Image (cartoon, grey):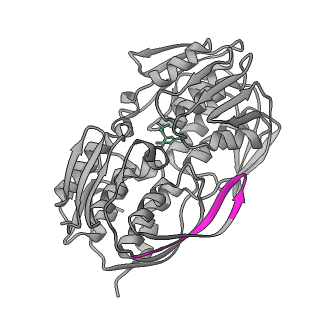
Amino acid sequence: MKLKNFKVNPVRKIGGVVFIPSDKSISHRALILSSISRGTSRIFNLLESEDVFSTLNALRNLGIEIKKQKNFYIVKGGSLKKPEGKIFCGNSGTTMRLLSGLISGHPIKATLTGDMSLSKRPMKRIIEPISLMGAKIKSKKGFPPLEIQGSSNLKGISYKMPVASAQVKSAILLAGLNAKGTTKIFEKIPSRNHTEIMLKNFCADIKIKNGWIVLKPSKLKAQNVMVPGDISSACFFITAGVLLGKIKIKQVGINRTRTGFVDAIRKMGAKVKFVNKHLLSGEPVADILVEKSKLKARNFSKKDIPSMIDEIPLLALIATQSEGVTKITGAQELRVKESDRIRATYEGLRKMGAKIEELKDGFIIKGPQKLKGTSVQGFSDHRIVMMLYIAGLIAEGRTTIDDISSVKISFPDFFKIAKKIVRRD
Ligand code: S3P
């Protein structure tokens, strides 16, 4: 497949049943918690994407034995060792931030680096709380590379989260596992809670009460983990369905801290149903039924953002096809993702003819507006590339995306699956 100047032709209809890849956030956490547990864990349906491989390779470099068997990974829990050379986290903020917390609680020294995009992402948000716990972290003025001197003498802290971030929360919890005393974290707006759910499943002493997460130092026990489908990946096809036809997406995680996008578009009139609900390794899962729907504009603000943080480019696309003016605010965190996603979304949709205004923390979008195919930039950001592809499906004329190689970060088979749902009849 040609990765540069990739052409997207519009379609009139989509349909069918799809399986989407496993959850990226849960895959990172399954590898990390298994690595420090007593015994051997098995992880079924681990997401095999570049970000998750960054975590897997880092853990191997830290001395953990991880092997692939037929359809699962085997992780032998052990003690972390000083890595050989630097740990390269690639494009993955989750790898760098979670491993910083993990390494901080162990008496080893490690340097964490990343690619060009990761090197520009803020790390002060983890350096501050983890340093308060007693780890020594050097950085380049708050940016990677991070040089961490961990310790088995960290102390638990009580911390009110200044930004809603599951990566920061998870880094503190991972450091807290090995600290002396209790670690307490308060979140005003809840961020994704996969770390808390999985820590409980791995037998950690963790409780959630009135917005506080309370973790006592714990020894984890190995488990078998089944990773559900990634709702963030499903949302590209949910969007395609709402705009273009009937589609069923199988076995998707529907944890309430992740379904903000579905809640938002339902309020706009989207027909999205969760059926066949059940639990998988403590996480709620369902099949998702989507139908083409008539959409109305709505406003979204700060409290709505964390549970749809990765889906806001898609919400902007949906807003271009909705009747009225949609305002999205409180989403300034998008500026420090794999790309500046406010700018990237604005640039792409504006170039395709959307009536979109860029705010410092979001957008104002007037719809419905027929989009026009043209050449657009993905900013080497997987979620921007996939959003632009869906935009290309509903546009008039052909859209050309400059480079689609970044989909390997979270969804290597995106284009293969997308091709299957297109109906040409
Ligand atoms: C993630 C948390 C979110 C999200 C990212 C994955 C995680 O980042 O955007 O894609 O796995 O913890 P923040 O913690 O920066 O909000």
The answer, for residue 413, to whether it is visible in the render is no
Instruction: Find the magenta span and give its range.
Output: 278-292
Quadrant location of residue 34? top right
Q: Quadrant of the N terminus?
A: bottom left
Q: Residue at x 63, y 57 (%)?
A: 228
Residue 142 in view here: yes
Residue 339 vs residue 111: left or right? left
Depth check: give the residue in front, 270 or 312. Answer: 270
The percent coordinates of residue 358 (x first, y second) are 22, 45
Residue name at image x 21 percent, y 66 percent: 371
For residue 7, which quarter of the picture?
A: bottom left
Labels in figure, total: 0
Residue 269 location, x and y as percent? Answer: 40, 69
Q: Residue at x 64, y 61 (%)?
A: 285
Residue 49 left/right relative to 310: right
Q: Is residue 279 magenta?
A: yes
